[in-house]
Image: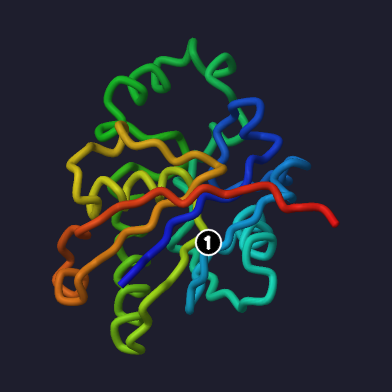
Amino acid sequence: MVIALFRHGLTEENKRKAYLGWKDSPLCKDSKNMSTNSRYDLFFSSDLPRCVETAKILFPTKSLKLLPELREMDFGQWEGKTYEDLKELLLYQRWLSDPLSYNPPGGESFEEFTHRVQNGWEMITGEILSKNIERCAIITHGGVIRFLLSKFAPIKNDFWSWQAPHKQGYELIFEREALRRGETCTLLQEVPLTAKELG
């Protein structure tokens, strides 16, 4: 069974390296030109517009199941701010050095974020197992992908060691029973996204 993870296209806020969680930002022009040859049977997406738009670019004829559980971490008062904006704040410095013990003001703790994403994952896997779906795609955010890879990839890396590029997805390939039991996948492979051919 294949579960693919795709990050939304690069946004204007991503370009300026701002924290972008529950607020939204328009996709950059180049992001509207992405394409993939990969095929899936069922599609889930974060309900935030940057993910929905990316899903429609990559899989234009497919219907989406939108899950707020697949949203990025809520950065609260730090949304739209950059490292340069925040670096003098003591709470921000503490959060950077110990993100498990501190959280953005008005935002989510790491524990709240990962608990929410885990709930979304269980909803998705429950549905694909009950419907006997073999290939499923999830369009979501960098933090969500890094968390899922830290839990289910066959290589053990922590959350901060994983990368979630905008122009590449991952396919996690599971044995059915391993997926049912919440175990790691047997194989992880990259799925490059390419520019659409003109003409």
Q: Is residue 121 above or below residue 24?
A: below
Q: Is residue 90 above or below residue 25?
A: above
Coloration of the structure image: rainbow
> Which quadrant holds residue 77?
top right
Judge from the rendering whether residue 144 lies leftward or rightward of residue 7; answer left or right.
left
Q: Is residue 70 above or below residue 158?
A: below
Q: Secondary structure at mark 1?
A: strand
Q: Position of residue 40 (x, y in %)?
A: 49, 73
Q: Look at label 1 and name its amino acid.
A: Ser
Query: What residue is pinned by disc 1?
Result: 46
Q: Position of residue 177 (x, y in %)?
A: 15, 76
Q: Which residue is outermost to the top?
A: 88
> Which quadrant holds residue 91?
top left
Which of these two is toward me, 149 or 105?
Answer: 149
Judge from the rendering whether residue 29 lies leftward or rightward of residue 157; answer left or right.
right
Residue in the picture at 47% in, 63% down: 138
Query: Is residue 114 shown to the viewer in this render?
Result: yes
Residue in the picture at 49% in, 13% down: 87
Residue in the picture at 45% in, 60% down: 70
Q: Which residue is outermost to the bottom?
A: 131
Q: How many marks?
A: 1
Which of these two is toward me, 144 or 60?
Answer: 60
Quadrant in the picture for the C terminus: bottom right
Query: Is residue 112 shown to the viewer in this render?
Result: no
Q: Position of residue 195 (x, y in %)?
A: 69, 47
Residue in the picture at 63% in, 61% down: 58
Which of these two is toward me, 122 or 154?
Answer: 154
Q: Position of residue 1 (x, y in %)?
A: 30, 72
Label 1 neighbour load within 10 Å: few <14, some 14-19, many 20+: many
